């Protein structure tokens, strides 16, 4: 109890926690710094801010930050366990989840119901029923329709219980075993639940079995009770006696809630849901001895409630692509969240100007109007901000973080409801009903044992015949002497039994004291182990964050390494191809230069240098590897443009002359739109003939060809002079096209030969 008061005095600001949904993709938009801080990281494709500048990282602080893989149990113990303790001690509390659609709000509040994944609602009712005692029978407490309760008479309660169904049992989940302390044993209690949906700014009762698709005339109004607390009028408040019964009613009500499929979430909540747990307590009527029943005085009834709110996720129509009814729902959801934000802003402004507070517009939306009393100090408030670190949700997360930052600046007045002080006799380990049962059993056992002990024999009658009646006197003397002897023996037995009882009691008391001391030591050890476990958990979470960071860096480095290795392999392959092409060009050029640098020689039977040169070029073309079909070869044509290599097929063929009726070969002209590289012999013999080779003005003349000479030229001419068998001089011009190669170099494809021969007449 003292712990609850200490927590209450610690802070009066609205407490905000942050839970991050697990995300295994690249570039998460939210990163955890420690248990209280997160960093909002803009993804690579994040849009610019309103000033046209790139967005920067920003840090936000919370009361607590949950790890992405934090268990549901840890989230409940940190965020809602103390609220259940408040409920048991007669205080009100409000806990709600906030975030974009698909961030895990419903999972945090409800869970999956299988295994140990139960959410805050199932665990809260488990802890509540583990902690309360003296639970009244059903129908003893009844709602009065004005946000209050009254006590039925025993006979009336018995008649009302006849219509209640049997108990429920749900065995698929793991039940929470924790309990809180502070329940008064001189009180009797009952638990009531209600479930309300705020859909399109209208309140609907989800426990109403008549609620269906047609919701015409099914809306509920919000009223204020005598204490100024707002409530939903005429809702069904179900009395429950176990957590299984709560979940059974909750699951049936979930089927009536509004869900729909959107682009961002296959099962998106289209409304705000408010699940309220009320604990009704009243003192036990001590005047009734035959039964246990609370007093009927309504002024002594204490009602506390815990409201668990699952807010619908904020949406942008641009992303969800909502149309029709979905678009209307999204507009109403965003509007209600906007009004909630404005209320926080107005509260913060009023704190800055305490002398001139402005009215807060709670009535603009049903959501804010329903919880108006909480914002004015009628209980504690806590918010869990759920965040999805997907890069696509970065812009929405900015608004969520700014809203959380705004909410933490709002000071909530402390609750005016006094916490009842518990006496030692009313804070026992056992319930009042169990203590009374023990006393009744003791009285029954004692009634079966006779309380009279016949220790002495029946005394003889005192009758004397006369003064000398010695026989009667002797008889009386013997009786009382025997009685004295018996009394002395009984006193000795009593003293012996007293000593034995004292010894036994001392042993029992010593054992009880030692056991109590041992229990205290064990409890102290448990507290120390809990602190150690808490520190270990913090260290584990820190190491887990470090491991996640290292894994991200390792994945990044591995990707960079693989990309670099792939680029290096491509570069080596390209370099090898270039080297091979360059080697082939060098070999070709060496062969050409070796043939041209030889001076004119005498006639030979082999056909001369031209035949040898032709043979070398023919063998070079035959040994050249075929070009893959996927790579197209291009050559420069007239006008300087490149044409496909297959266009060269017809360039070396003869031209038909119809006048002579026979195909005559005719030389092709040079330099039409291009540049000619004229490779002349080292020792050229002047011919002095009428026919002379004519080259364009931009022709480049050289006697020793280098690879760079081929750049910028489209045609290639090799001039060769030789003497035939008859001693006549023969001048030949080998003409070709310079074409680019796949390796980045150039090659020559010969297509024509011109000969100028001088003979004696």
Image (spheres, rainbow, N blue to C red):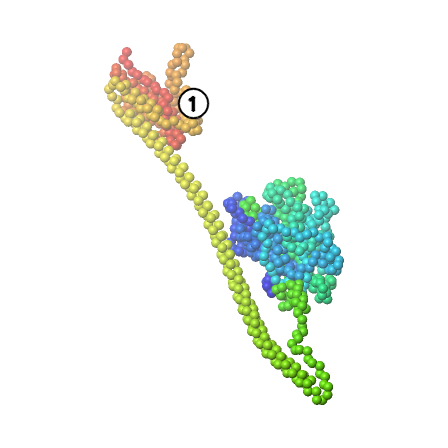
**Residue 356: where, in percent of width, then height?**
67, 60
**Residue 107: where, in percent of width, then height?**
59, 49
SS at mark 1 in the image: helix
User: Which residue sits furthest bottom?
Assistant: 467
Residue at image point 66% right, 48% down: 252
Residue situated in front as seen by the camera: 150 or 404: 150
To which residue does mark 1 refer?
Answer: 647
**Residue 640: where, in percent of width, then height?**
43, 26
**Residue 701: where, in percent of width, then height?**
33, 27
User: Which residue sits furthest left?
Assistant: 602
Q: Can residue 742 be seen in this view?
A: yes
761 versus 222 height, above or below: above
Residue at image point 37% right, 18% down: 667
> Which image quarter: residue 317?
top right
Residue situated in front as seen by the camera: 630 or 237: 237
Task: Please indicate whether residue 43 sits to the left or right of residue 197 in the image.
Answer: left
256 versus 290 height, above or below: above
Task: Please indicate whether residue 392 sits to the left or right of residue 558 in the image.
Answer: right
501 versus 300 height, above or below: below
Q: Residues within 10 Å of mark 1 (few under 14, many from 20)?
A: few
User: Quadrant where the N terminus lies?
Assistant: bottom right
User: Quadrant where the C terminus lies?
Assistant: top left
Residue at image point 71% right, 81% down: 461
Residue situated in front as seen by the camera: 566 or 343: 566
Q: Can residue 369 be seen in this view?
A: no
Residue situated in front as seen by the camera: 647 or 257: 257
Task: Please indicate whether residue 729 sits to the left or right of residue 175 in the image.
Answer: left
């Amino acid at each position: 109890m003292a712990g609850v008061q200490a927590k209450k005095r610690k802070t009066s600001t609205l407490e905000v926690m942050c839970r991050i949904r697990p995300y295994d993709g690249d570039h998460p938009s939210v990163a955890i710094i420690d248990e209280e801080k997160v960093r909002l990281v803009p993804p690579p494709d994040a849009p610019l801010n309103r000033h046209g500048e790139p967005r920067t990282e920003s840090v936000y602080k919370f009361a607590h930050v949950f790890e992405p893989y934090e268990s549901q149990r840890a989230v409940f113990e940190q965020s809602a366990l103390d609220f259940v303790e408040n409920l048991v001690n007669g205080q009100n509390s409000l806990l709600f989840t906030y975030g974009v659609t698909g961030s895990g709000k419903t999972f945090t509040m409800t869970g999956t119901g299988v295994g140990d994944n139960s959410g805050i609602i199932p665990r809260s009712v488990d802890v509540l029923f583990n902690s309360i005692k003296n639970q009244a029978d059903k129908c003893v407490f009844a709602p009065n329709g004005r946000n209050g309760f009254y006590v039925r008479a025993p006979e009336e309660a018995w008649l009302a219980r006849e219509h209640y169904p049997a108990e429920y049992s749900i065995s698929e989940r793991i039940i929470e075993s924790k309990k809180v302390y502070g329940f008064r044993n001189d009180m009797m209690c009952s638990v009531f639940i209600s479930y309300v949906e705020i859909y399109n700014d209208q309140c609907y009762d989800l426990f109403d079995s008549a609620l269906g698709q047609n919701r015409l005339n099914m809306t509920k109004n919000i009223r204020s009770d005598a204490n100024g607390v707002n409530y939903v009028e005429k809702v069904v408040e179900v009395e429950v006696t176990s957590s299984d019964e709560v979940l059974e009613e909750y699951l049936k009500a979930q089927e009536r809630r509004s869900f729909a499929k959107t682009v961002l979430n296959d099962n998106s909540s289209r409304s705000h849901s408010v699940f309220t747990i009320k604990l009704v307590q009243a003192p036990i009527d001590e005047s009734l001895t035959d039964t246990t029943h609370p007093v009927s005085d309504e002024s002594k009834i204490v009602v506390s409630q815990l409201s668990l709110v699952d807010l619908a996720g904020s949406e942008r129509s641009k992303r969800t692509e909502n149309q029709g009814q979905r678009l209307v729902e999204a507009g109403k959801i965003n509007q209600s969240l906007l009004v909630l934000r404005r209320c926080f802003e107005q509260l913060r402004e009023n704190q800055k100007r305490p002398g001139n507070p402005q009215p807060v517009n709670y009535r603009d939306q049903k959501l804010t109007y329903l919880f108006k009393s909480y914002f004015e100090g009628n209980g504690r408030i806590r918010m869990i901000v759920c965040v999805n670190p997907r890069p696509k949700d970065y812009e929405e997360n900015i608004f969520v973080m700014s809203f959380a930052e705004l909410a933490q600046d709002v000071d909530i007045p402390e609750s005016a409801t006094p916490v009842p002080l518990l006496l030692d006799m009313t804070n026992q380990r056992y319930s009042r009903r169990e203590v009374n049962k023990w006393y009744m059993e003791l009285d029954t056992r004692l009634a079966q044992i006779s309380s009279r002990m016949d220790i002495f024999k029946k005394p003889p009658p005192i009758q004397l015949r006369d003064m000398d009646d010695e026989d009667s006197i002797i008889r009386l003397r013997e009786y009382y002497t025997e009685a004295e002897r018996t009394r002395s023996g009984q006193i000795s037995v009593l003293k012996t039994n007293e000593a034995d009882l004292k010894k036994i009691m001392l042993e029992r008391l010593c054992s009880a004291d030692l056991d109590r001391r041992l229990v205290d030591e064990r409890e102290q050890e448990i507290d120390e182990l809990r602190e150690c476990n808490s520190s270990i958990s913090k260290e584990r979470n820190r190491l887990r964050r470090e491991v996640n960071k290292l894994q991200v860096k390792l994945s990044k480095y591995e990707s960079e390494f693989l990309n670099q290795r792939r680029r290096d392999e491509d570069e080596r392959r390209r370099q090898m191809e270039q080297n091979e092409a360059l080697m082939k060009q060098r070999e070709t050029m060496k062969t050409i230069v070796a043939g041209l640098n030889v001076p004119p020689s005498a006639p030979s039977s082999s056909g001369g240098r031209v035949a040898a040169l032709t043979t070398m070029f023919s063998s070079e073309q035959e040994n050249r590897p075929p070009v893959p079909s996927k790579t197209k070869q291009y050559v420069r044509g007239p006008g300087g443009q490149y044409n496909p290599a297959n266009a060269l097929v017809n360039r070396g063929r003869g031209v038909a002359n119809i006048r002579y009726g026979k195909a005559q070969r005719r030389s092709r002209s040079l330099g039409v739109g291009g540049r000619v590289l004229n490779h002349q012999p080292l020792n050229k013999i002047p011919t002095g003939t009428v026919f002379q080779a004519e080259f364009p003005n931009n022709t480049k003349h050289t006697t020793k060809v280098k690879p760079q000479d081929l750049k910028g030229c489209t045609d290639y001419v090799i001039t060769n002079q030789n003497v035939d068998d008859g001693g006549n001089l023969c001048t030949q011009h080998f003409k070709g096209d310079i074409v680019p190669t796949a390796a980045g170099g150039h090659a020559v494809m010969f297509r024509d030969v011109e000969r100028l021969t001088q003979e004696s007449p």
